[in-house]
Image: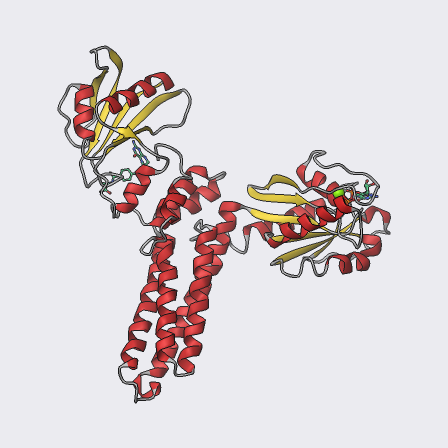
Amino acid sequence: MTPTTDTIAAIATAPGAGGVGIVRLSGARARAIAEAICGVALTPRHAHYARFAAANGDTIDDGIALWFRAPASYTGEDVVELQAHGSPVVLAELVQRCIELGARRARPGEFSERAFLNGKLDLAQAEAVADLIAAADAQAARAARRALEGEFSRRVEAIAADVLAIRVHVEAAIDFADEPIDTLGGAQLRARFDAAAHSLDELLRAAERGRRLRDGLHAVIVGPPNAGKSSLLNALAGSERAIVTDIAGTTRDLLHEVVRIDGVELTLVDTAGLREGGDAIEREGMRRARDELARADLALVVLDARDAEAGRRAVADAIAAVPQRLWIHNKSDLLPACATPPDADHLPVSARTGAGLDALHARLRTLAQGEGAGGEGAFTARARHVDALQRARGELALARAQLDADALELAAESLRQAHEALGEITGHVRADDLLGHIFSSFCIGK
Ligand SMILES: Nc1nc2c(c(=O)[nH]1)N(C=O)[C@@H](CNc1ccc(C(=O)N[C@@H](CCC(=O)O)C(=O)O)cc1)CN2
Ligand SMILES: Nc1nc2c(ncn2[C@@H]2O[C@H](COP(=O)(O)OP(=O)(O)OP(=O)(O)O)[C@@H](O)[C@H]2O)c(=O)[nH]1
Ligand SMILES: [Mg+2]
């Protein structure tokens, strides 16, 4: 761990004018710097009304000074807040004064990074702080709060502890290599494996829902040319974002549009129609469409309802690997009523008349939220968490197979890998550039 003895300063409140603005200091010299500015001796956790002075004695502002004595502070270091009037000019002068007195400007996320390095928050909790600040609605904020309170971290750690216990058992068995595993509590060991795998599966599902709560759903609109993909994007976006013509091959570039359906964020991507042939530009468009599908949570397949079967064939291989798909039988206005009986995954829609859009909205909302996404105990998660859980799950399955093959040493190694993958989530195990990567996306002053 790098020593963090230098003292950092930053404006902690949002940019722009406000009622009150806060300059925050953290580090060994925070208290001395603040006392020099305020001209009084500070008492921990006491709100001092003070005059904040410039180097020449002029008053920068008057306000409240608040000292949190290490380690009982957000960062675990001495922290002082100078709570001034919310003027960007005053706050900039205060930071400047702190720097003259020996502080340096904090990097983005550096306060939270110190909180992590000093054991106040684990990595998933620190990420939840940023997710809480960025939450777009009450549901996402509630879920980020749960992650911040450690709901997610506790479940990760409980499974990590189980995996460690299994590994200890397997390693003990290695020392009795002559004995078959079944005389060494093999049945009990298998039961523990199954229990850990089950908990991991449940946590993985919850984390996937948590990731969607944070990132929204990435839905790619695909289908044959002229089916009405761009028209559907426009209908869902509520504005004429994409060019619509009756010429097949109109759309070439990807077009991203973020829409919110009842508080759930959905990134819609319009793509070039998929078909054989086409000119060089159209073929490049189709290549981009396929690339985009590789990142999709959901394929919104738009078909011309009059020729759904041909459309289905045109897109079949492109959408094969997308986790979820919804079939939109568009241009229902050109068919006799109820020609395509709707079910959950096949919806008759008319982008032209708006028929069927309500049902589509409802279905998209359910898909974006995932089953019970906003429900009891939901927490936000990130793609890196889901990825780590998947790796842990894979290693655990591998270890179980190795155990069955009496390859105990291999099983122990796989269990070690599973344990490490889980440790990456909470930051007990760290890849070198991971911290910088995570904290640099925070705002300054957090
Ligand atoms: N004025 C102000 N409001 C704020 C913050 C802040 O830094 N300043 N926060 C910044 O994010 C959030 C609150 N987070 C905080 C987390 C821990 C501690 C703290 O002093 N913890 C000590 C003592 C705990 C206790 O007394 O129970 C500790 O953990 O030891 C303070 C704020 C939101 N509101
Ligand atoms: N009758 C009817 N026509 C529609 C409907 N939706 C789209 N169209 C028409 O179908 C034609 C193609 O629509 P687009 O939205 O450009 O189709 P696209 O799938 O984006 O086509 P490409 O970008 O060329 O792949 C246009 O003339 C639209 O006006 C609909 O629901 N009913
Ligand atoms: Mg189009």
Q: Which residue is situated farthest in the left direction here?
A: 41
Q: Which image quarter is the C terminus in?
A: top left
Q: Is residue 308 above or below residue 446?
A: below
Could one spot residue 299 in this view of the protein?
A: yes
Could one spot residue 375 in this view of the protein?
A: no
Which residue is drawn at the image coordinates 33% and 20% (left, top)? 92
Image coords of residue 46 (percent x, y)? 18, 29
Q: Quadrant of residue 107?
A: top left
Which residue is drawn at the image coordinates 65% and 49% (left, top)? 220
Q: Is residue 101 above or below residue 422?
A: above
Q: Quadrant of residue 186?
A: bottom left
**Ligand 1 is found in which quarter of the picture?**
top left
Horizontally, is 288 left or right of 385 in the view?
right
Image coords of residue 149 (percent x, y)? 34, 48
Image coords of residue 50 (percent x, y)? 20, 18
Which residue is drawn at the image coordinates 83% and 46% (left, top)? 333
Q: Quadrant of residue 259?
A: top right
Compare residues 415 and 191 and report the one nearer the observer: 415
Q: Is residue 220 above or below residue 182?
A: above
Compare residues 43 and 54 and report the one nearer the observer: 54
Q: Which residue is situated farthest in the front direction here?
A: 280
